[in-house]
Image: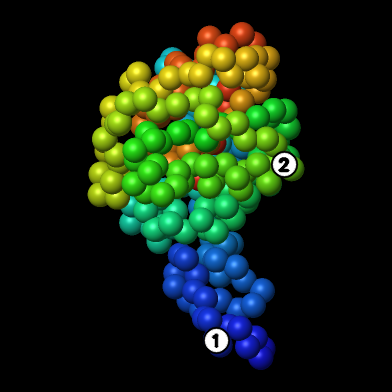
Amino acid sequence: MKKHLLDWLYPRHCEVCGAGLDREEDLLCRGCLEDMPLTWFWKWRGNPAEKMLWGRCRFETVSSLFYYHRESDYAHLTPKIKYGGNRHLGICLGEMLGRQMSGSITDIDVIIPVPLHPLKKWSRGYNQSEIVARGISTGLGGIPIAGGILKRTRWARSQTRTDMGNKWENVGGAFSLDRDRSEILRDRHVLLVDDVLTSGATAESCWDTLKDIPGIRLSFATLAYVE
Ligand SMILES: [Zn+2]
């Protein structure tokens, strides 16, 4: 096939394997898209991510787009969003997850991205969870995102690329609630969004902060699930 002029001028490469992309491909080549290790958690109640959190918090559903294995080429995806500033990638993968979820989880009212501490957001320039949440919102058909109600008040040590998968984040009591605005979450099904699910400590801490809002139901979604 003849290459599109723009692909000659601005060659694009697969974010997983690095192969050149043709004009019909965006971010991932066809092969990497087909081979993506999807979890299918959105169709699977009692999935491993939900089981991990049993006894600690009670989410309606826990979904992740793909399995994260340290050795896998797909492990590059979330650091590119979290540290590399690749917003387009975060939005597209979030949208992919939202579209998948929309077939099985149909009653989400509002999305809350897991917040960063304001200083960390300032130093990074963005919150990767907000980017993923924007994609999920689109994939779910335009569910509103509520920012600023859940706040991170304590600076937890960050997960780095090298220790992902074996460290328990110290996030207990790291979040607080804007009591004046939390009323809009009453009787709502709220989807919390983060980039990676590892130990579940962040999910548990958010749950603890939100669970006493009357009638609230909570679900959790991430791009990657670390086995
Ligand atoms: Zn590829």
Q: Which mark is residue 142?
A: 2
10 Å crowding of disc 2: few (<14), some (14-19), many (20+): few
Mark 2: secondary structure? loop
Q: Is residue 54 visible?
A: no
Q: Is residue 12 visible?
A: yes
> Which quarter of the figure is the C terminus placed in?
top left
Q: Quadrant of residue 59?
A: top right
Q: Residue at x 63, y 88 (%)?
A: 5
- Residue in front for this viewpoint, 86 or 108: 86
- Residue in front for this viewpoint, 180 or 109: 180
Q: Residue at x 50, y 70 (%)?
A: 14
> Which quarter of the figure is the N terminus placed in?
bottom right
Q: Amino acid at mark 2?
A: Gly
Q: Residue at x 45, y 16 (%)?
A: 208
Count of numbered marks = 2
Locate residue 131, reporting x and y percent. 53, 47
Q: Amino acid at mark 1?
A: Leu
Q: Say if 203 sits above or below 41 in the image.
A: above
Q: CA distance from mark 1 to mark 2?
A: 34 Å
Q: Which mark is residue 52?
A: none
Mark 1: secondary structure? helix
Q: Residue at x 29, y 31 (%)?
A: 156
Locate residue 82, reporting x and y percent. 40, 50
Locate residue 86, reporting x and y percent. 47, 59
- Residue that carries the numbered disc 1 in the rendered image: 9
Mark 1 or mark 2: whose residue is earlier in sequence: 1
- Residue in front for this viewpoint, 176 or 42: 176
Locate residue 11, reporting x and y percent. 52, 81
